[in-house]
Each structure stands twice: as C-alpha cells, then as structure tokens.
Amino acid sequence: MSFRLLYQDKDSRARLGVLTTPHGEVNTPIFMPVGTQGTVKTLSGDELKTSGVEIILGNAYHLYLRPGLDIIRQAGGLHKFMGWDHPILTDSGGYQVFSLAKLRKLSENGAEFSSHIDGSKHLLTPEKVIDIQKILGSDIMMTFDECVHYPAARDYVEQSVELTTKWARRSKIYFDQQSEDSGRRQLLFGIVQGSTYLDLRKKAVEELLSIGFDGYAIGGVSVGEPQDLIYEIAQYTASLLPENKPRYLMGVGTPPDVLEAIADGCDMFDCVVPTRNGRNGQAFTSQGELQLRNAEFKGDFRPIEEGCDCFACRTHTRAYIRHLFNAEELLGLKLVSLHNVRFYVRLIELSREAIRGGRFNAFRKSIMANYNKRSG
Amino acid sequence: MSFRLLYQDKDSRARLGVLTTPHGEVNTPIFMPVGTQGTVKTLSGDELKTSGVEIILGNAYHLYLRPGLDIIRQAGGLHKFMGWDHPILTDSGGYQVFSLAKLRKLSENGAEFSSHIDGSKHLLTPEKVIDIQKILGSDIMMTFDECVHYPAARDYVEQSVELTTKWARRSKIYFDQQSEDSGRRQLLFGIVQGSTYLDLRKKAVEELLSIGFDGYAIGGVSVGEPQDLIYEIAQYTASLLPENKPRYLMGVGTPPDVLEAIADGCDMFDCVVPTRNGRNGQAFTSQGELQLRNAEFKGDFRPIEEGCDCFACRTHTRAYIRHLFNAEELLGLKLVSLHNVRFYVRLIELSREAIRGGRFNAFRKSIMANYNKRSG
C-alpha cells in the first residue's frame, strides 16, 4: 500500500497520512505548487525545497508539446530534466485538451486536437497518456479524462462520465500491462467527474472503485461553478471515497477553500493561485490578500507578513517590493511568488499540527476569522 | 587613504589593490554588476553574494525619479531599501540625463530635463547630485558630468570638458562642506571626460587632480565609438592617473574588454552586459558566448559551462534552459543572468590570481585565445 492513514480527526473528516512515492514520502494534507512547463514559475528547485515544498505538479499536455517527449526521454525523465529529485504528480492533459487546445474532436478512442502553440495535430488516448507519463517518469500519474465545464446539461455529463469511466478502465489495464515489478512503481490515480450532478458523481466513484486505483481525484471542480457548489461536490464525493486511499481535489484553491476541503476529508491540492497571483503582486497573508502594487504600500517598511520566515519577508519590505512592481523589475514577481508558496505550505503545516492536536475545527475558524478581516 | 595598492605587475600596468568603503573592503580589480533601479535585474542579494559579488552599482537618476528620495530616506538609505549591506557605487546621473531624459537644457548651473517616466521637470546641479547620493548613502559617489556621445566636434568637447571640470570643483567643495567627520565617510570620485581627443583627456585629468578625489573614473567611453578607440582612451587616460588612487573605467564591457582594461591599469568596471545579455539567453563561457535560444542546444544536456560552480551550472542543462527561454519562463532569465555574473566575477578572481603570480599577460593571452575560438 502506498498510502498510510495516520490519524483521523474526531470533529471533522480531516485526516493525516503519508503517501510513499518513488521519489520519497509525501505527508498529507499536502499542497502541490504547479510547474506547468517543467518549472514552478519564477522559482528554482532549491527555493521550493527551502519553502518546505514536498511535491510539485507537472502538466503532461504542456510538456508533451514542448519541449516534447524526445528531449525529456533523453534527459532521463522530467525530474532530471528540471533538476528536481522530489516527487512529481503529472496531470493527464484532460483539463488542458478541453480548455486550451483548439479544434478538439472527441471519440471513444480519445481526443484529437490542435496544439495551442503551433496548430500541429495530435491524438491523445488513455493508453498514450500513460505512455507520456511513463516517459515523464512522474511519481503519480493521472488517468485521461474529459473535464466538463460548468454549466453542463445532464445528458451530456451522463455520457461524459461513461466515457471517462471507460477511459479509466483502459488506463488501468494498460498501466498494469506496462508496469514493471519494481519497488519504484509509479502510482496511478483515477479521476471522479460528474459535474454538479451528485448521483453521477456517485456512479463515477463506484465504477472507479471497482477498477481500483492508488488514489482518487475529484476533477471538474473550479471550472466556473459558484463556490458553494465546489464545497458541496468536494464534501459529497470525498465522503464516498475509501478511507485507505488519498483523495486529491484538483485545481483548488484559495486558502479558505483549502481549509474547507481538508475539513471535508480531502488530502491533496494543487492550484496556480500562489504563483499566478504572486506575479500580479498579490500576496497572501494571515490577514487576507494584499495587492502590493497599491500606493498604500509606497512607504510601508514592514515585511509582507510579520513573522514569516520566507526569504522575501526576512530580507525585503512591502515598500521595496511595491517599487519593484512599479519599476517592472522581475525580482518582484519572484519575491511574491516565493512568499505565497511559503504561505500555502505553512498553512498546510499548521493544519497538520492542528489535526494532530485534535483542534482542527477551532484552528480553521480562527484562521478564517482573521483572513476575512482585511478583505471584509 | 581609502585605497591601498598591493601589487604592481611587471609586464603590464595591471595591479592589485584594496578599496576601503563604509560597507567594507573591495578588492581590485573589481567588476560591479549594475543595479539600475535598486535591483540587479532578476537576482536577489543572496544570489549576488553567493556569486562572489563584492560591490554593485546603483543609478542615482533612476532612483531619484523612482521610488524617489523620500521613500529611500524613510527606508534609511539605498542599502536598507534594497536589502544589500555590502558596498554600493552610485553614478551621478550624468549619463542618463544625456541618454535617457527628454528635453534636456544644459547651463552652467546644471541640467534641466523631463523624466523619461512621466515627463515631470527636474533640475540636477552638481550640488543636488551630491545631496541625492548622500540620501542614497552609497559608499562611492560620482560627480555630476556631461557625458558626450560619439562622434562629437572638438569645439563642443572642449567646452564640455570645461563645464564638467567646473562641476567637479563645485561638487568637491560642496562635498567637503557636507561631509561629516566620521569613519564611515562616503568616497567621491571625479570623472575624466574628453571624448576621443587625447589632449582634452589630459587637460581634464590635470584639472581633476588639482581638485583631488578619492578615485578617478574614465567616462564617456563605450558611447558608440569603435572598440579600438575605447582601448586607446582607456590606456592613455589610465597612464595619466596617479598610482595611489583607484581607476574606474565606466560602462566597460565584454570579457575581452575587461581583460584589456586591467592590463592598461584600470581597477574598476561596470557593465549591464552580463545581466542584459543573460535576459536575452546569451551566456558567457570561457569558449565565447552561447545563444541558448538556438536549436543546437535543444538536446544538449551539458551545463552552460563545464566546471562552473554557479547554481545554474550545478543544477541545470543547456537543454533545460533553452526550453525555459522557448516557453518564455522567467526562471531562464534568472539562470543565465546568474551564470553570467558568476562568469564575470570568476574572470576577475582569476585575473587577480594571475597578477599575484606574475603571469597576467600569459593568462590574458590564453583566455583570449580560447574565448575567440567559438566566436571565430
């Protein structure tokens, strides 16, 4: 078993676990910064490690198109290519094919599409997506799925879940054929789709469980639906998933979203928010979000967040970072991204401590009360 | 005396020295990375220190306009504002007023100009430029000068040198009035102008020497003239300057330029080349310059330079960095800038060793022979 459940909170569904991967153990709950193109934007591997990052996410779709699999194979896999020897989860490209690619054509076999970079034509099938992720050498692979946007008609979603389930079964069969009998086996996660239709989510879960995966992801959330629905889907779907497998809520979210999802029993999270917002000058703090471009920070010589141990906060002031953004200096983008990643990692670290101490609900309430102070 | 000459090469005019500043000692020869707007582009202070950088340059003109002196005064000076507690040299703004600013109007009193950022009107006088640099708190201040472009008519240059000399005298008088009797006294350097007219350079040197400065800069080179002329001006002017004061060749240059200037007896250099070219994907190596965007590096899994101890070379390959540039990832700009700065610092470190060992000419020849291999 790759996942060990260490502790189950009494007052919520929050839990502590350890996931063992070919590149080491990952403690859960865990937040995974997104390294779309083989780099977590603006940050180097040593900066991620210093920030306490245990695992990052890579995008199969992006890396398949650029630099391409030949280069990554020659490099000896994604870890070596990007100089990161800790765990990596790669998504299957499902989300990107349906959000980024052009002229996509869906069939039972797979998805044909044109590259968003150069228009070249490609076909992704469940089997090919396994092959891609084997070449990438990620620690955790995701099955190919159809990611449906919100809102979607029930009929469409019903058919789509059926297709995703078929693809999941083909993925598992192909994965089992390919998989070597080695201690460093890559893990394979299935993805629960079903849009906002809870009965379809339930059906999807049942079928995926009958196939059997190393972990289960809740996909197709954070695709345009109201926030309440994200919580409802996450809570309901997580409650259907087995205790002894990790649960990964894809593409979520803001700090309050992550705390809510931990309380609902989700274990793994990824989101571009800390780095994307960081590049826009938006910093996360325990008091809420700060837009450091704003004139109010012109003469503010405090760190982004008092007491934060990140390089940006130990070394620089809000006034300096505001100046960097104002003068279009790239160092500013790095500093806020670095702080935001550290903020997310610390939020997770504190959550684990609170779960361990049996006080997660109180912790979450106090964080939320503070967090909304500034925004409110 | 702030400068101690430690060693004079027998076979060239190259020399070793130590310059004592309020923020510590600087070994010469020295290369100063350029931190125009209070940041050496893409790099943080700890990355500069790890690269062996001893002193950086800041631009009075840029910092005066943005973030403005109020902010830097409130921060407690430029060192604290940017989080760098090692020496800083600030230029006087002369070069920027004459290259960047709009609608400039020159008079004996000073230079009126419009900001290149917002068009606001400003007047810089020699005295004001001292005031600015006192607020910045730089370790080495430069006098305000007129930087003449190439080519320039003799009549114009003659008058210009006269003006620059008058400004230098006013700067020194004002500096002496302002200067506190403290162990942490800022240093003041005069700037030799005179374009390509060697007799005017000589006249400028004589007048500046009669005023007396902590060091002497050779300005108005690398402003469009052929490379041979840079060497000729540097060599001739350096030969006129006293042995017991540091000689700073402004805005120079490529690695071969720097070695040539060291041989001519220059001690200090600054140039945007390592960081500007780095942001364009151009890496300096002992074999010459590599354009890492080029397709030839697509599958090249060697470091930028074998044996280089910088983070980029220890951790990443040319193929990965090429991918980062291709995918427009900001980490690429940082990695090549970091390598280039380390390359320049190492070139200087090796030059010092060679001077100390009495073999600088042989060292320079062997570096040059290798360097031109690739370009040629």
Image (cartoon, coloured by chain):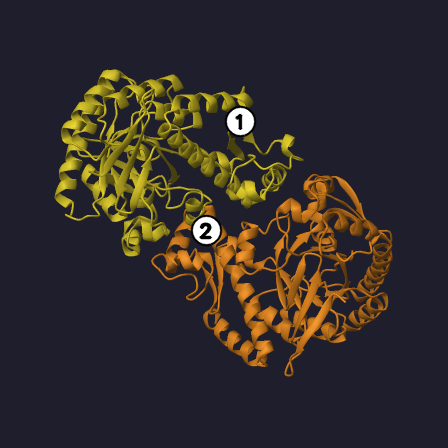
Chain colours: A orange, B yellow
Q: Position of residue A54 (x, y in %)?
A: 61, 60
* Image quadrant containing the N terminus of chain B: top left
**Pointer 1: what residue?**
B287
Q: Position of residue A28 (x, y in %)?
A: 65, 68
- Nearer to us in this view, A50 or A15: A50
Read off the chain for label 1: B
Mark 1 secondary-structure assignment: loop
* Image quadrant containing the C terminus of chain B: top right
Q: Is residue B321 left or right of residue B4?
A: right
Q: Is residue B351 above or below residue B186?
A: above
> Could you tell me the amino acid type at mark 1?
Gln
The answer to which quarter of the image holds residue B317 is top right
> Could you tell me the amino acid type at mark 2?
Gly
- Nearer to us in this view, B220 or A172: A172
The answer to which quarter of the image holds residue B64 is top left
- Nearer to us in this view, B5 or B300: B5
Q: Position of residue A329 (x, y in %)?
A: 44, 46
Which residue is rendered at x = 50% and y = 76% of the image? A369
Mark sitting on residue A332:
2
Mark 2 secondary-structure assignment: helix
